[in-house]
Amino acid sequence: MMVKDRKTAYHILILGLLSAIGPFSIDMYLPGFPAIAKDLHTSVGHVSLSLSSFFIGISAGQFLYGPLLDRFGRKRPLYIGLSAYVLASVGCALSASADALIALRFLQALGSCAGMVASRAMVRDLFAVKDNAKVFSLLMLVVGVSPIIAPTLGGYITAAFGWKYIFILLSLIVAAILAAVHFTLAETRPPDELLSLKPVPIVKNFLAVLKEPQFYTYAFTGAVASAGLYAYIAGSPYVFMELFHVSEKQYGWIFALIAMGLIGASQLNSVLLKNYESRQIIKIALLCQSVTGLLLFIGTLTGLLELFSTIFFIFIFLCCQGFTFPNSSALSLAPFSKNAGSASALLGGIQMSIGAFTSALVSILHNHTALPMTGVMAACALLSFSVVMIGHRIIRYRASLEEVEEQSADMMSGT
């Protein structure tokens, strides 16, 4: 798919910015962990719980916004979520304790996930199903700027002004995105007054989505693979700044370099989609990621890896993620049109729930080595590969059963 006009390009840019709010909120304050811990008189491990609370907030919030986006249209819930984000970010800047920061990061996450859910649903609204994987790859071009710019910028802000100004800047950025949504982005789906917001119909709607084999196969494949990324995000500040003794600014540049692999792979994915199906690309990417994850873990366990070799293996690991995310997202949402908001919310909720668990797991397993981070990353890659292989068999079996049923119905109607 080519971006044929300025309007389409602008739509993709806005959707990409909405998708990037969450990642930017995560990546930008990572270099400030030691400074936050020192200022709030606590440990880096305690501060890292604010990352876990952010993931939990995103997980819970997506289940909330899905039905709201289908009931009230896309823009009204966006206004509420982005406004809440701005207020919570100011609160983070004013935090006087680590526990207050942890709580406010949860509220900040509830606001940020509105943009993530809405952007995925709008892709399904605006573009044909066959183009969705390519659109998600283009969104990754925008989202990928976050881990390149955010930690580097966060490192400089922390060094020059202090970590509190990171959250001030985040509030200003999202206020600008909110203004862009209001003045330039049209509503992509009208409100549906017939859609109930009572708990029972909402749960039934989610269950209907979850029963679709193509959805749960690729939703869990993408979610578990992404969990390896979140394990890296949670563990990398300690691994690089404490174990390898790099500075805040150097950590930002390392994070940016590794992120370039992720964004580069996502753009190469668009080229590969001209000749290969998304299903084929996912299999190869996850196989490569599993092998890389094992080598990273074994190298850490044996003490063979130093700074540059660790960066190299993580770079390759996240390159594979650049192929997995856009294809798994597109394949998960492909069966849905009417319930795209709920499907998008369930997809994001599953992804962030597993991400929250893995980021917390890295903190819980903390043993003053890189093993918790690399071990969880390897486990996520292997499990994701297993999920997609088993899921493919279930999908094929389900398709064969439906084909038999159709043939039987044709034979009976013929008699």
Image (cartoon, rainbow, N blue to C red):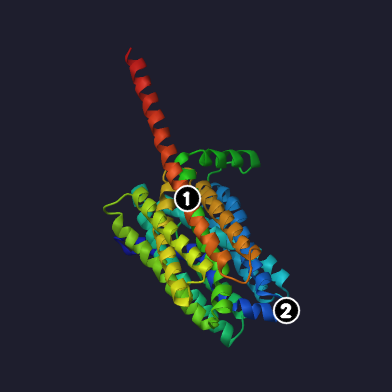
Say which element carries label 1. helix
Q: Residues within 10 Å of mark 1 (few under 14, many from 20)?
A: many
Instruction: Determine which residue is flagged by label 1.
Output: 221
Residue 279 location (% of width, % of height): 37, 48
CB atoms of marks 2 and 1 within 8 Å: no
| Residue pictured at 50% horizontal, 78% vertical | 252
Residue 43 location, quadrant: bottom right
Label 2, label 1: how far apart the Cα atoms are = 40 Å
Say which element carries label 2. loop
Front position in the image: 371 or 278: 371
Residue 13 location (% of width, % of height): 41, 65
Does 163 appear above or below 394? below
Look at the image and tell me in which quarter the N terminus lies.
Answer: bottom left
Residue 79 location, quadrant: bottom right
Q: Is residue 84 visible?
A: no
Does 100 appear above or below 361? below
Instruction: Determine which residue is flagged by label 2.
Output: 41
Does 266 appear above or below 65? below
